[in-house]
Image (tube, rainbow, N blue to C red):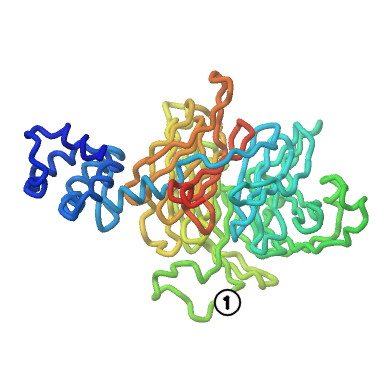
């Protein structure tokens, strides 16, 4: 009744008699309905069959889409109504829960493969695992390193039994970067560790008990090729409390990691940076003519972002095919190379291994001076159709021009792209129109304090759920209106 009264107030015609409602023409109803928002239009459509028919008119929903999402928006679904519903009712833009346990900036976040667990790490040297649910709870927590040392990357293996960490150890003789493995099932103990030369080579999982590291010492001190090393670990008997509490650095001397050269690359003017791995069967899977029938599960595609030795030089993304079972891998040429004039601030592989997403900051030059631009571009590469041109998303900005890069990590789902930022909010784009549809805030109590959002992660089985972590020391869980309603 209230909706009907408002519609009549908005109309410019004289109030009809009660038995004349059905005589209102379509142009009059369309004119009146054009003043309503999408909630009111839905209510009006329930009044009668005639109003329902008129309320479905595409012109009404197109104008509403432009009103809420901007005129740059383009339709992807079959109707403007379903498109607006997808981006307002099914986008994860509503804060569901704020989790507090870290006492300093949180640097990274990820879901396990099933979405059962969330892992976080940060400047306080802590690694935490959360049990995800309607009320997410802290499950495990361990101080891996003591400040000023910190942990800046965390990743679950496929079986959800172990975590791979990247740790930066601050010492009197200089900084030291370590890759470490934690057991989730065995009292959250650190069970293996290996040194990594580059702090930005965060490593990744090859399978449940093997992670990838870079043998870059040879890169500097000999003419040998650069080696990516498969590190296979085995767990000790952790019944002894002393083994559970051993410091991370003590693990470097352990002999429970077997090293084997996995991939060799010719020495050149680039150094290994961010790395991800997918099965060969996933490469160009939508292009039957390019798939190999005799491929096996041990064939991998290594996706490596390589940074030039000159910070303002041309960077590149290279794709290598490698066999994890090969005992003596030969020097491998890339199967694909993408050259870019950008600095990489973060990378993530989508949960379905279909897309890889990069954050880039362009390099500006003026004579002999160079610096990174404020604008941050996101590059999305379709791994199932690698010949397709990468898609670029814009609208994210750094706080200032600089000669160094702060890292903040993106993620991708089937309909959305999201990223952290140097601002105090994560950003979400619609993949189909490339428009920003929302910013998810992380505000500190002191508004004068800069507060970056370090990373975001979509739930691997539900794109209507996303998590974000930031300098405010909090893990925030965001859901769509649809998910919130069901909860």
Within 10 Å of the Cα at label 1, are there few (<14), some (14-19), or many (20+) other Cα atoms? few
Identify the residue at image location x=60%, y=60%: 113
Q: Where residue 287 appears, x then y in whole percent?
A: 39, 71
Could you say which quadrant of the image residue 468 lies in?
top right
Q: Residue furthest front?
A: 18
Residue 91 visible here: yes
Position of 477 with respect to 394 (left or right) is: right
Q: How many marks?
A: 1
Q: Where residue 72 appears, x then y in whole percent?
A: 26, 41
Identify the residue at image location x=57%, y=21%: 449
Q: Where residue 3 appears, x then y in whole percent?
A: 25, 39
Q: Which residue lies furthest to the bottom in this view?
A: 294
Up/down of 230 relative to 25, above or below: below
Could you say which quadrant of the image residue 27 lies in?
top left
Could you tell me which secondary element the residue under label 1 belongs to?
A: loop
Q: Where residue 67 appears, x then y in whole percent?
A: 26, 37
Residue 225 visible here: no
Position of 108 with respect to 430 (left or right) is: right
Along the viewing direction, whichever of 49 and 72 lies nearer the viewer = 49
Up/down of 386 relative to 106, above or below: below
Along the viewing direction, whichever of 290 and 9 lies nearer the viewer = 9
Could you say which quadrant of the image residue 238 lies in?
bottom right
Up/down of 176 relative to 412, above or below: above
Along the viewing direction, whichever of 232 and 332 lies nearer the viewer = 232
Q: Image quadrant for the N terminus?
A: top left
Q: Which residue, given by chain and number where applicable, does mark 1 sit on?
A: 296
Up/down of 452 relative to 65, above or below: above
Identify the residue at image location x=55%, y=45%: 467
């Amino acid at each position: 009744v209230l909706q009907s009264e408002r519609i009549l107030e908005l109309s410019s015609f004289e109030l009809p008699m009660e038995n004349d409602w059905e005589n209102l023409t379509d142009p009059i109803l369309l004119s009146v309905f054009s003043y309503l928002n999408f909630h009111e239009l839905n209510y009006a459509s329930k009044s009668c069959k005639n109003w329902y028919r008129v309320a479905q008119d595409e012109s009404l929903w197109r104008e509403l889409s432009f009103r809420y999402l901007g005129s740059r928006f383009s339709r992807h679904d079959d109707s403007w109504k379903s498109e607006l519903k997808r981006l307002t009712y099914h986008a994860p833009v509503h804060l569901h829960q704020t989790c507090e346990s870290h006492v300093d900036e949180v640097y990274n976040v990820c879901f396990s493969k099933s979405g059962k667990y969330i892992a976080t790490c940060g400047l306080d040297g802590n690694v935490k695992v959360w049990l995800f649910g309607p009320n997410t709870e802290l499950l495990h927590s361990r101080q891996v390193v003591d400040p000023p040392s910190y942990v800046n990357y965390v990743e679950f293996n496929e079986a959800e039994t172990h975590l791979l960490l990247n740790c930066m150890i601050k010492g009197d003789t200089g900084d030291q970067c370590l890759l470490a493995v934690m057991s989730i099932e065995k009292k959250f103990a650190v069970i293996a560790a290996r040194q990594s030369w580059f702090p930005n080579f965060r490593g990744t999982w090859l399978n449940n008990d093997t992670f990838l590291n870079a043998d870059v010492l040879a890169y500097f001190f000999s003419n040998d090729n650069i080696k990516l090393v498969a590190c296979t670990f085995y767990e000790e008997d952790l019944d002894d409390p002393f083994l559970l509490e051993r410091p991370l650095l003590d693990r470097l001397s352990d002999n429970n990691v077997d090293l084997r050269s996995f991939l060799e690359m010719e020495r050149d003017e680039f150094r290994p940076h961010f790395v991800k791995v997918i099965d060969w069967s996933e490469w160009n899977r939508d292009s039957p003519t390019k798939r190999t029938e005799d491929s096996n599960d041990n064939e991998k595609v290594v996706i490596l972002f390589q940074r030039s030795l000159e910070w303002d030089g041309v960077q590149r993304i290279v794709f290598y095919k490698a066999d994890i079972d090969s005992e003596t891998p030969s020097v491998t040429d890339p199967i694909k190379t993408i050259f870019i004039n950008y600095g990489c601030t973060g990378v993530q592989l989508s949960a379905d291994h279909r897309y890889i997403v990069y954050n880039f900051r362009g390099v500006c030059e003026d004579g002999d001076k160079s610096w990174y631009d404020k604008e941050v571009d996101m590059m999305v590469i379709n791994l199932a159709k690698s010949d397709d041109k990468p898609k670029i998303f814009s609208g994210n900005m750094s706080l200032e021009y600089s000669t160094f890069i702060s890292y903040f990590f993106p993620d991708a789902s089937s309909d959305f792209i999201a990223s952290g930022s140097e601002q105090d909010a994560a950003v979400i784009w619609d993949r189909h129109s490339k428009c920003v549809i929302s910013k998810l805030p992380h505000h500190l109590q002191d508004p004068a304090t800069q507060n970056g959002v370090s990373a975001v992660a979509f739930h691997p089985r539900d794109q209507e759920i996303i998590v974000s972590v930031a300098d405010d020391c909090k893990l925030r869980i965001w859901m769509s209106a649809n998910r919130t309603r069901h909860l």
